Image (spheres, rainbow, N blue to C red):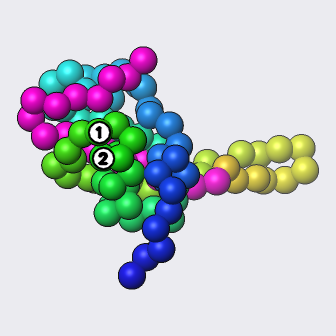
Amino acid sequence: MTMPIDATYTIKRPMLTEKSTIGMSELNTYTFLVDRTASKDQIKSAIESLYKVKVASVRTSLSKGKTKRTKFGYSTDSQTKKALVRVVEGQSIEMI
């Protein structure tokens, strides 16, 4: 059993890219940058409580941080996790 996490801590920000806007308009799918430790159930409940919509499905993707060469050696960016949230037909999330 996982501990409940505050919804604003789970969802960091929406990702507005060219590919995600196509998903919003055609597939009713929204992309969010989320906390790395958040599970799909926690993401689903956070989206439903923040945006007052019914979530149909959640897909997650964990991206490895990029390695960069610096003057003092190598450094890596932190890992990021994004969630693709599909909303029930007829509902939408207002992205500004």
Point 30% across, 46% down: residue:
48
Amino acid carrying mark 1 in the image: Lys
Label pair 2/1, CB-CB below 8 angstroms: yes
Extreme residue in the left direction: 89
Tell me: residue 34, above or below residue 17.
below
Camera-side residue of 63 and 59: 59
Q: Is residue 79 magenta?
A: yes
Q: Which residue is mark 1?
A: 52
Question: Callout 2: 10 Å neighbours few (<14), some, many (20+)?
Answer: some
Tell me: residue 31, above or below residue 93.
below
Tell me: residue 52, above or below residue 38.
above
Point 35% across, 47% down: residue:
49
Magenta residues, start to end: 78-96
Point 16% across, 49% down: residue:
56
Q: Which residue is mark 2?
A: 48
Secondary structure under badge 1?
loop
